[in-house]
Image (cartoon, rainbow, N blue to C red):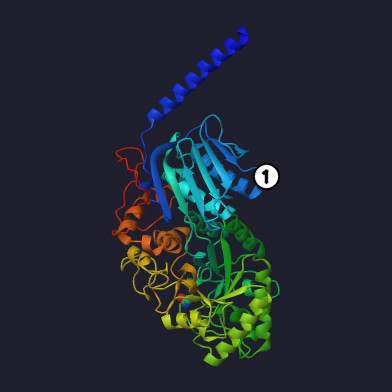
């Protein structure tokens, strides 16, 4: 009895100390305001509750029991925190908050039927941060948002000092378009596996889900095809300017596909045909109508090459190439180019594209073609990628095909920002950061409706670029705007508001070592502090 009394006195005393400690901790931290975040892409809804969730050594990360895919995402979050803070937070299984300290709880949103499959909800209270989604993809996006709430230093190894304050409130978020991508041309100049992986990292941060690889063109063939080995040994041996080129072995390609898949990014392989094929025509004489191999080409002209569309061996070649690449591509798409085939008669072009399309289907893939393919026999099972000539996009949509919008005047990352840009081309004009942001996938082509649009993609052609730094310079910051166009509702996208948010991403890009273009149109500034001088308000959203 005495012991019991003593125990209960001790317990009360300890609890008292604990409560004092906890409440005095809270008093140390000023309120924060979630609506002041600069998240890109802008979330669907943000409701602030103006308190503070503290990440410190006492944090627990918990994930729903027995859910391996979710655990993987929880471990990813722990890995991000470990890299930034040096502290290794354990991931425990469980669906309740820890009784001591703050908790990040990762859950499947069984209750919330209204959240689309790739959506997420971040509900942040003072002691409990709950991240819910119905898929691991949704969770992944929630983690990217959380990453942006953790300030720019989270991107730097050892850059984050604990405690870190996160504003409280609720973010509910999901994408507007199913396809949100970038294209990297590895044909005009070759980029190696580590460079491609870095590009994938960047896309993942901004919730993009597709990387289209332009794997062949006049200047180079960049992927191993076992049944046609000269494509790479000869056709891959140069690039624009006459450098040594290069190619991905099948193992390299699989490594890229797996790395992308881990970040919920689908690889779309493109073999451009029947034009843009000089590297193949130089490697195999039988693909040419005159039976003679062409010379390798290291210039930048377009429209001079074509496969011989009335030779059966050409279709055997196309079948082998599409089969071998499809076998190592888990994603649903195969891109067969079809652009700028100026040396192919229109009738031959249509005949060829119809057969190539059937070959793609026979290997279980959905065909994507550049907008010119709208002239061929396509239907609602195909996808047309718009880059120029609105009337062709409309024709594609009328045939029932879905559209990927890549308007060269807005979304082409290889176009110079201004006349002084050290890299890039000017054939589509100049594309400042506002031009890359100020467009909408639905209103761009008259007669198109939202249901016609699968999504957006920003192509980066590589005539003028040779290094990761070059890629970064043309990609950043325009890619953030394209990511937002693919993700955020049109009514919430306004340049004047976006440019302020973008300006606050300077520290983040710097923390990642990105060599970006500091556009004079953007008010670059330090990332907004969530800590001080913040008005208390109960209003939700921005
Ligand atoms: C293209 O820019 N030729 C698709």
Q: Residue at x 31, y 52 (%)?
A: 524
Question: Is ligand 1 within 8 Å of the beta carbon of the residue shown at mark 1?
Answer: no
Choose between 435 and 26: the one closer to the eye. Answer: 26
Query: Which residue is at 54% across, 13% downward?
Result: 9
Mark 1 secondary-structure assignment = loop
Relative to 240, 440 lies left or right: left
Give the residue displayed 43% in from the left and 26% down from the top.
Answer: 23
Pinpoint residue 85: horizontal percent, then vertical percent.
Answer: 49, 37
Question: In the picture shown, does residue 344 fall above or below 439?
Answer: below
Q: Looking at this rendering, what residue extends furthest in the top direction? A: 2
* In this view, 222 is above or below 505: below
| On screen, residue 379 above or below 496 | below
Graded by Cα atoms within 10 Å as few (under 14), some (14 to 19) or many (20 or more), the crowding at tag 1 reads: few
Does residue 299 appear in this view?
Answer: no
The residue most toward the right is 227
Q: Nearer the viewer, residue 101 or 154?
A: 101
Position in image of residue 202 (x %, y %)? 48, 56
Read off the residue under disc 1.
66
Q: Whole-percent x and y of residue 527?
A: 35, 46
Count of number-bearing discs:
1
* In-front residue for pair 1/238: 1
Residue 296 seen in this snapshot: yes
Q: Position of residue 477 (x, y in %)?
A: 39, 59
Quadrant of the frame with the N terminus: top right
């Amino acid at each position: 009895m005495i012991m019991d009394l003593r125990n209960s006195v001790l317990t009360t005393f300890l609890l008292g100390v604990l409560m004092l400690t906890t409440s005095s901790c809270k008093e140390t931290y000023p309120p924060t305001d979630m609506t002041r975040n600069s998240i890109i892409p802008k979330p669907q809804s943000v409701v602030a509750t103006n308190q503070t969730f503290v990440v410190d050594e006492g944090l627990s990360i918990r994930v729903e029991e027995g859910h391996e895919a979710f655990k993987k995402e929880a471990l990813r979050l722990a890995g991000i925190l470990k890299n930034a803070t040096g502290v290794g937070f354990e991931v425990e299984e469980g669906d309740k908050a820890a009784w001591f300290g703050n908790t990040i709880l990762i859950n499947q949103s069984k209750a919330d039927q209204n959240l689309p499959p790739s959506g997420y909800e971040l509900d942040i209270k003072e002691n409990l941060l709950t991240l819910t989604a119905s898929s691991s993809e949704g969770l992944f996006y929630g983690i990217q948002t959380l990453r942006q709430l953790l300030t720019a230093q989270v991107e730097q190894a050892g850059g984050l000092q604990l405690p870190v304050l996160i504003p409280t409130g609720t973010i509910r978020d999901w994408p507007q378009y199913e396809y949100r991508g970038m294209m990297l041309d590895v044909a005009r100049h070759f980029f190696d596996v580590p460079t491609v992986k870095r590009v994938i990292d960047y896309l993942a941060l901004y919730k993009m889900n597709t990387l289209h690889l332009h794997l062949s063109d006049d200047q180079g063939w960049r992927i191993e095809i076992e049944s046609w080995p000269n494509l790479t040994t000869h056709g891959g041996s140069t690039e624009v300017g006459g450098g040594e080129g290069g190619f991905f072995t099948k193992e390299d390609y699989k490594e890229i596909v797996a790395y992308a898949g881990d970040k919920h990014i689908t690889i779309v392989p493109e073999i451009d045909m029947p034009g843009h094929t000089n590297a193949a025509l130089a490697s195999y004489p039988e693909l040419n109508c005159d039976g003679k191999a062409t010379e390798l080409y290291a210039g930048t002209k377009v429209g001079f090459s074509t496969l011989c569309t009335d030779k059966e061996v050409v279709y055997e070649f196309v079948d082998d190439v599409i089969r071998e690449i499809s076998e190592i591509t888990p994603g649903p798409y195969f891109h067969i180019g079809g652009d700028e085939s100026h040396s192919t008669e229109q009738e031959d072009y249509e005949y060829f594209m119809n057969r190539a399309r059937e070959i793609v289907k026979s290997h279980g893939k959905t065909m994507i073609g550049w907008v010119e393919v709208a002239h061929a026999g396509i239907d609602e099972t195909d996808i047309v990628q718009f880059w120029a000539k609105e009337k062709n996009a409309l024709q594609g949509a009328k045939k029932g095909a879905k559209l990927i919008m890549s308007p060269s005047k807005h979304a082409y990352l290889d176009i110079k920002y201004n006349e002084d840009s050290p890299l890039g081309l000017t054939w589509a004009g100049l594309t400042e950061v506002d031009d890359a942001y100020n467009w909408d996938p639905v209103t761009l082509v008259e007669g198109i409706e939202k249901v016609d649009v699968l999504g957006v993609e920003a192509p980066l052609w590589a005539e003028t670029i040779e290094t990761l730094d070059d890629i970064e310079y043309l990609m950043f910051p325009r890619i953030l705007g394209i990511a937002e166009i693919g993700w955020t509702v049109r009514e919430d996208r306004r340049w004047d508001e976006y440019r302020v948010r973008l300006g606050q991403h300077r520290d983040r890009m710097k923390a990642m070592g990105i060599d970006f273009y500091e556009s004079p149109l953007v008010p670059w500034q330090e990332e907004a502090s969530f800590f001080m001088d913040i008005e208390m308000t109960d209003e939700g959203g921005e």
